[in-house]
Image: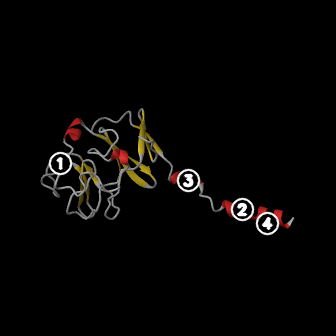
Amino acid sequence: MGGVGGIFALIPFLSTMSPSEKAKSAGAPVEIDIYSMTPGTYKVVEWRGKPVWVVRRTQDMIDNTLEENEILSDPKSLEDHQPAYTQNKFRSIDPEFLVLVGVCTHLGCSPKYHPEVEPKAWDASWKGGFFCPCHGSMFDIVGRVYKGVPAPTNLVVPPHMFEGTILTIGEDKEL
């Protein structure tokens, strides 16, 4: 009888060790319908408490993505900050869509999206991309970090997948 009573006393204790529903949902995948996104638009969604940017690129953005450039620290995205299936020139599954965690790799600020190709106060030859106003880190239009800025690495590409017009962030399939 003492053993059975001990088991029943242990059940509430063990149940406190499993994650709460709030904790489970914090890491849950996020689904977004991208059907209504037109070229040049972008959405911000939250995944794991962080902003995630979804950019639908224009044909000009796709055409003007730098292959390799001496101004970038990691132009081939060799650092492990993206799934293997996005380790390409566009850092994406589909060149038309970019999915990035919107957190600077320097101190965690949120860079601003500046897609226009025009001189900016921080770069007279700005080709479009992301600029972190906290400490001046710059990232190109696919989230690769410029040389000589505080951010040490490219912006993070989260695991994601497309099924029709549904983008799921936080989950992927073997490609």
Q: Which residue corresponds to mark 1? A: 127
Q: Which mark is residue 16?
A: none
Q: Secondary structure at mark 2?
A: helix
**CB within 8 Å, label 1 to label 2:** no
| Residue at position x 29%, y 45% in the image | 88
**CB within 8 Å, label 3 to label 4:** no
Q: Is residue 14 left or right of residue 145?
A: right
Q: Is residue 11 left or right of residue 78?
A: right
Q: Secondary structure at mark 1?
A: loop
In x, y percent, where is residue 33? 42, 37
**CB within 8 Å, label 3 to label 2:** no
- Residue nearer the viewer, 61 or 22: 61
Q: Which mark is residue 12?
A: 2
| Residue at position x 21%, y 55% in the image | 72
Q: Earlier in the sequence, mark 1 or mark 2?
A: 2
In x, y percent, where is residue 52? 38, 50
Q: Secondary structure at mark 3?
A: helix
Q: Which residue corresponds to mark 4? A: 6
In x, y percent, where is residue 14? 68, 62
> How many C-alpha atoms fall within 10 Å of the one at disc 2: few (<14), some, or many (≥20)?
few
In x, y percent, where is residue 60? 20, 38
